Image (cartoon, grey):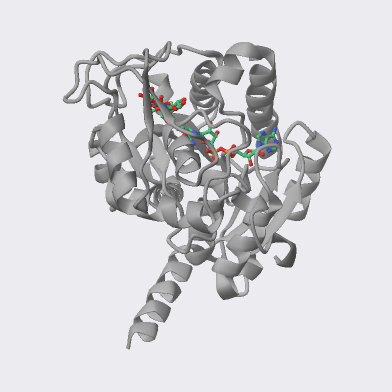
Amino acid sequence: MLPLIILTHRFLLFLSNSISSEHGFMIPKTVLVTGGAGYIGSHTVLHLLLAGFKTVVIDNLHNSSQTSILRVKKLAGEFGNNLSFHKADLSDRDVLEQIFVSTKFDAVIHFAGLKAVGESVRRPLLYYNNNLSGAITLLEVMAAHGCKKLVFSSSATVYGWPKEAPCKEEFHLSAVNPYGRTKLIIEEICRDVCSSEQEWKIILLRYFNPVGAHPSGYIGEDPQGVPNNLMPFVQQVAVGKRPALTVFGNDYNTTDGTAVRDYIHVADLADGHVAALLKLDESNTGCEVYNLGSGKGTSVLEMVRAFEQASGKKIPLVIAGRRPGDAEIVYASTEKAERELKWKAKYGIDEMCRDQWNWASKNPYGYGSQEDSTD
Ligand code: NAD
Ligand code: UFG
C-alpha cells in the first residue's frame, strides 16, 4: 500500500511540475541551479528531482565536491537521470551562453557565491567580484534567453543587528560586512530588474541558520578549512578534528547568556525552494522576499546540548569574548512564508542534530572520507 501511495504522490508532483508540450505530452519543468554542488544547493537539487523537475547544475567546485552531485543522483533513484552537471564559473559568460542555448529553462535558482564573513572582511574585492559579477552575468544571460524567473539565496545577515525579534521582511536592512553587503546589493539589483520589466519574477529567500543533513547521511555540509559557523565547528569537535568549541560570549541578555539564532533543517530549506518555484508561476508575483527560518530562537548552549544528546559525545567548551559584529538575538518571523508560500519548517533542533551527527559520523572528513572513489 505504502509504495502505491508514494508513487501516486510522486506522479501528482510530476504533473504539477510539468508543462504540456505542443504534442500534448507532459514534460518536466527544467531548472538551472547555480552552486548546486554546495551544501544547500545539493539538498535542494535532490528535492527538486524528487518533485519531478529536470535540474541542471553549474558550479565551479570552489567550495564543494562533485561527489555531492554523484550522491544526489544516487539518492534520487530513477529521477537521478534528470540531473546534469557543468563544472564552470559563473563569470564564464560563454559557458553560460552555451548552457542556455542547449536548454530552455523555466527558472533559475542562484546559490553560487562566496559566504565566509571573515574572509569577506579580509578580501572584499574577491567577494564583490565573485558574488556581484556572478549575479549580474547570470541575470544578463537569463534576459538574453527569455528566462525571467529567479530564486535568489539571500540571508538573514541583511537584517544587520535587528532592533527586535522576530525579524519581519519589511524591517530596515543593513550590512555589517562585505559578504552581507553583496547580499543587500544583489537584492537591490533584483528589485531594480523587476521594476524595469514586468515579465521578471524574482523571489529573494532570506535563510536563517541552516544545519543538519539528509537523513541518509549521504550528503551534508563539507566546509573547507576552519568552519566559521557554529554547527560545522561542533561537528568537527565531535569527530575529534578539533579539541574544543570556543563559545563567543556568555554575557548576552538571553536565558543562558549565549547568543540566540534561528536554526533551520537544510531539508526544510530545500522544500522552501520548491515552494518558491511554485509561487513564481503565480501571475501577480514581481519581486518578493521571504524569510526561511523555523521562527524559534535557540541559544548556543542549547544547540550544543542538543548535539551532545544526539551524538552521545561531550563537546568541550572554551568561553571567550563576543565575536565582533555578532547580534544578540536573531530569529525569523515566518508568517509571510507560511501564508504565501504555504511553507513551514517541519523539523526541530533534535532532528537537525540527529541528521548532522549521522552525516558527520559516516563522513568524518566530509566528501573526502569514504567510498568516494567508487561513486
Ligand atoms: P556553499 O559554499 O556550500 O555553496 C555555494 C556553491 O557555489 C559552492 O559549491 C561553490 O563552489 C559555488 N560557487 C561559488 N562561487 C561560484 C562561481 N563564481 N561560479 C560557480 N560556482 C560558484 O554554500 P551554501 O551554504 O550552500 O550557501 C548557498 C547560498 O546560500 C550562498 O549564496 C550563501 O551565501 C547563501 N546563504 C548560506 C547560508 C549558510 O549559513 N549556509 C546562510 C544564508 C545564505
Ligand atoms: N558561535 C560560537 N562559536 C563558534 C561559531 C559560532 O560561539 O565557533 C556562535 C556565534 O557567536 C553566534 C552563533 O554561534 O552567536 C551562530 O553563529 P554562526 O556563525 O553559525 O551564525 P551567524 O548567525 O552568526 O551567521 C551566519 C552567517 C551570516 C548569516 C547568518 C544567517 O555567518 O552571514 O548565519 O544565515 F546571515
Q: Is residue 359 left or right of residue 60?
A: left
Q: Is residue 45 above or below residue 116?
A: below
For image coordinates 22% across by 17% down, the residue present is 164
Residue 159: x %, y % from top left = 36, 19
Question: Would residue 27 be seen by someone viewing this image from the given angle?
Answer: no
Q: Can you give x and y, in whole percent of width and height, for residue 227 in the image?
A: 54, 32
Q: Residue at x 49, y 66 (%)?
A: 50
Front in this rendered view, residue 192 or 186: 186
State which quarter of the image contains the N terminus. Answer: bottom left
Relative to 93, is 23 above or below?
Answer: below
State whether residue 179 is above or below residue 262: above
Residue 151 in sight from this viewpoint: yes
Q: Quadrant of ligand 1?
A: top right
Relative placement, left or right, of 318 versus 105 is: left
Depth check, front residue: 374 or 52: 374
Q: Nearer the viewer, residue 255 or 121?
A: 255
Residue 256 at what x, y percent from top left? Answer: 20, 25
Residue occupying image coordinates x 42% and y 22%: 157
Q: Is residue 214 left or right of residue 121?
A: left
Residue 240, how many percent across, how many down? Answer: 51, 43
Query: Quadrant of the rendered structure where residue 78 is?
Result: bottom right
For residue 298, what is the image quadrant? top left
Residue reaching furthest to the right: 94
Q: Give the residue drawn at x 31%, y 30%.
A: 300
Quadrant of the image containing the C terminus: bottom right
Q: Is residue 335 above or below residue 281?
A: above
From the viewer's perspective, tell me whether residue 9 is left or right of residue 185. left
